[in-house]
Image (cartoon, grey):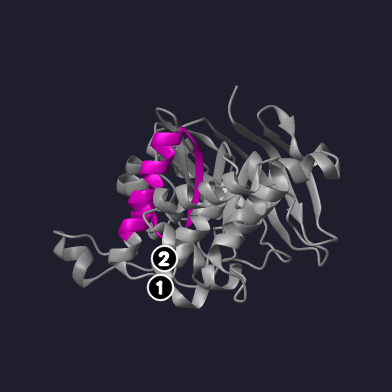
């Protein structure tokens, strides 16, 4: 049984925006799953839905099975226990997530006090242990958030996420706004913690290069749906969906003069979730769309070993050229 299994998840906000549409995914213990896509493609909504952190009025259907138990069917008391202890989230922007008027040691200790029956002296020892685990001296427990650098604050957020020894960590853009050296340190830290503690990890980012270097699998989302899912490095190097190709090509690659001097972009923006186009939602921006893409939606189909993509060109890859149709 997988640590996390999401089945046919749909999220619709009160204003009618369809932020997540029919997402299926699984995460096993010790596995690192990356979720990529532009802003507005449903990544953060998916993360919040996993622990029912969405705003009031949101409609959520499907199943979110954490250790076989459906998060969407949990009563409040059980859900409160699962948050932190079963799964926890590292949000982007640590300065906005930490309380500016409380010392970081107290903030790390809070979930332990709320979710564990731990003696006070053991709580302090656990805080020191967590700080050392994320590469900070125990003395920093007395510091306030503004006394720490951006990288140190992000380490504090990771320590808080680990406080109650969860089985699953959800990291939503954990290195946003950090310089590249600190970003590399944080990513290395996360990888080491996942391996040492045998955790499941979901890492959300718009940066395919980061996910390819960090994760085992890569899921690409567009307009609330999964359009490609496969081995992380292979998806990054040779995406089968045009959107995955565009995301990968947007980042210059070391040693490749063509990408360095002429990185490829993608014109336009993802569609408004409350006003999605008909057919394949990517077709208005797709450089290889067919006439049929405007009216026919595409489901995920096999694109290789443990690899799927939702594109008519994947379906037609082995078909005679005459049956493919004409590009627009």
Which residue lies at the image location 48% right of the left edge and 40% below the top edge?
A: 229
Q: Residue furthest top?
A: 1
Residue 204 image point, x, y percent: 50, 54
Residue 228 image point, x, y percent: 49, 44
Q: 159 or 185: nearer the eye?
A: 159
Residue 81 image point, x, y percent: 74, 41
Which numbered circle lies on residue 149? 1
Q: Which residues are magenta?
A: 184-212
SS for dot 2: helix
Q: Quadrant of residue 321?
A: top left
Q: Which residue is mark 2?
A: 152
SS for dot 1: loop
Which residue lies at the image location 72% right of the left edge and 66% below the top edge?
A: 275
At label 1, counting other C-alpha atoms closer than 10 Å, the crowd grade (few under 14, some 14-19, many 20 or more) is few
Q: CA distance from mark 2 to mark 1?
A: 5 Å
Inspect this view and state whether residue 79 appears: yes
- Please identify the quadrant where the N terminus is shown: top right
Q: Is residue 73 above or below residue 292?
A: above
Which residue lies at the image location 66% right of the left edge and 56% below the top edge?
A: 110
Q: Is residue 196 magenta?
A: yes
Q: Is residue 189 magenta?
A: yes
The dominant secondary structure in magenta is helix
Q: Are marks 2 and 1 in contact (CB under 8 Å)?
A: yes
């Amino acid at each position: 049984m997988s640590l996390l299994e999401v089945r046919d998840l749909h999220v619709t906000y009160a204003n009618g925006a369809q932020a997540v549409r029919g997402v299926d995914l699984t995460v096993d213990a010790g596995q690192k799953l990356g979720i990529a896509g532009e802003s507005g493609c449903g990544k953060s909504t998916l993360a919040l839905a996993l622990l029912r952190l969405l705003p009031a009025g949101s409609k959520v259907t499907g199943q979110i099975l954490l250790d076989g138990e459906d998060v969407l069917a949990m009563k409040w008391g059980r859900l409160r226990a699962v948050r932190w202890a079963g799964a926890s989230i590292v949000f982007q922007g640590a300065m906005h997530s930490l309380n500016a008027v409380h010392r970081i040691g107290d903030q790390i200790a809070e979930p332990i006090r709320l979710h564990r029956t731990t003696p006070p002296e053991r709580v302090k020892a656990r805080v020191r242990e967590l700080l050392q685990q994320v590469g900070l001296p125990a003395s920093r427990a007395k510091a306030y958030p503004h006394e720490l650098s951006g990288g140190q604050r992000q380490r504090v957020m990771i320590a808080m996420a680990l406080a109650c020894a969860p089985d699953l960590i959800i990291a939503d853009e954990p290195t946003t706004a950090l310089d590249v050296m600190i970003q590399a340190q944080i990513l290395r830290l996360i990888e080491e913690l996942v391996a040492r503690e045998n955790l499941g990890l979901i890492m959300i980012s718009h940066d395919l290069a980061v996910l390819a270097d960090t994760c085992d699998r890569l899921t690409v989302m567009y307009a609330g749906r999964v359009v490609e899912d496969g081995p992380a490095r292979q998806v990054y190097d040779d995406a089968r969906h045009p959107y995955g190709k565009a995301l990968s090509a947007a980042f210059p690659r070391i040693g490749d003069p063509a990408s360095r001097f002429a990185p490829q972009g993608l014109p336009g923006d993802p569609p408004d979730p409350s006003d999605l186009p008909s057919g394949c939602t990517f077709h208005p921006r797709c450089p290889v769309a067919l006439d049929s893409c405007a009216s026919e939606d595409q489901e995920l189909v096999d694109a290789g070993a443990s690899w799927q993509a939702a594109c008519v060109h994947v379906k037609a890859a082995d078909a005679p050229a005459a049956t493919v149709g004409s590009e627009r």
